[in-house]
């Protein structure tokens, strides 16, 4: 059974399954079966954007309600998220797109190991930034 068929059975829907974020930049290679260019994921920015919007909201709410002692860690959490987002968009996302496009084309990039090494070079920093943001927002909640 193909993954697509299994997904329909799990969700109980008979029609086409919802597509992830899509891009029209990926084209299939001559070696692979035709892959519609609108089905190649481009990387959904929704979680990153929503986290920053929520962080801004929390920071503004803390300061606006007179809880500057809670607003300071919330602002720090926002800064951690923004740095994480910059790292993700500048380093990880382009690598992800390259590897996904190659996968859809049925190819292996000639520099796959270098791409993987570059991606892995920032994963620890990204994890620490996410953890610090979480701790900062927990502290902001505790101080509010």
Image (tube, rainbow, N blue to C red):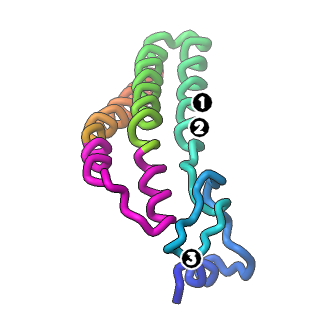
- CA gap, disc 1 and disc 2: 5 Å
Main SS of residues in magenta: helix
Describe the element under mark 2 as helix, strand or loop. Answer: helix
Q: Is residue 30 above or below residue 137?
A: below
Name the residue rendered at 41%, 65% in the picture.
107
Which residue extends farthest front?
30
Does 102 sit above or below residue 118? below
Q: Residues within 10 Å of mark 1 (few under 14, many from 20)?
A: few
Q: Which mark is residue 53?
A: 1
Depth check, mark 2 against mark 3: the one in front is 3
Q: Position of residue 7 (x, y in %)?
A: 58, 77
In what element is the residue under mark 3? loop
Find residue 124 and report its horizontal and vertical position in percent.
Answer: 25, 39
Residue 33, given in percent of the width and then of the height, sits at: 56, 76
The residue where tag 2 is placed is 50
Residue at image mark 3: 33
Q: Extreme bottom residue here?
A: 1
Q: Position of residue 64 (x, y in %)?
A: 61, 12
Find residue 15 and name its label.
none
Residue at 64% x, 61% y: name it.
Answer: 37
Q: Is residue 38 above or below residue 60?
A: below
Number of other residues with Cα within 10 Å of mark 2, as a class: few under 14, some 14 to 19, many 20 or more = few
Q: Are marks 1 and 2 in contact (CB under 8 Å)?
A: yes
- Magenta stretch, residue numbers: 95-120
**Apparent side of residue 143 relative to residue 26 in the rendered image (left or right):** left
Q: Earlier in the sequence, mark 2 or mark 3?
A: 3
Q: Nearer the viewer, residue 101 or 60?
A: 101
Secondary structure at numbered mark 1:
helix
Which mark is nearer the camera, 1 or 3?
A: 3
| Along the line of sight, the residue nearer the viewer: 111 or 63 | 111
């Amino acid at each position: 059974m193909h993954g697509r068929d299994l997904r329909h059975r799990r969700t109980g829907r008979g029609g086409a399954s919802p597509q992830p974020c899509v891009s029209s930049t990926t084209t299939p290679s001559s070696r692979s079966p035709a892959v519609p260019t609108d089905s190649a994921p481009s990387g959904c920015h929704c979680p990153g954007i929503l986290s920053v919007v929520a962080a801004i909201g929390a920071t503004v709410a803390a300061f606006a309600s007179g809880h500057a002692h809670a607003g300071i860690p919330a602002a720090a959490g926002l800064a951690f998220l923004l740095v994480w987002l910059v790292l993700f968009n500048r380093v990880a996302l382009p690598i992800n797109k390259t590897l996904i496009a190659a996968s859809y084309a049925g190819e292996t990039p000639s520099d796959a190991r270098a791409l993987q090494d570059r991606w892995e070079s920032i994963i620890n920093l990204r994890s620490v930034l996410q953890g610090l943001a979480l701790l900062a927002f927990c502290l902001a909640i505790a101080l509010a």
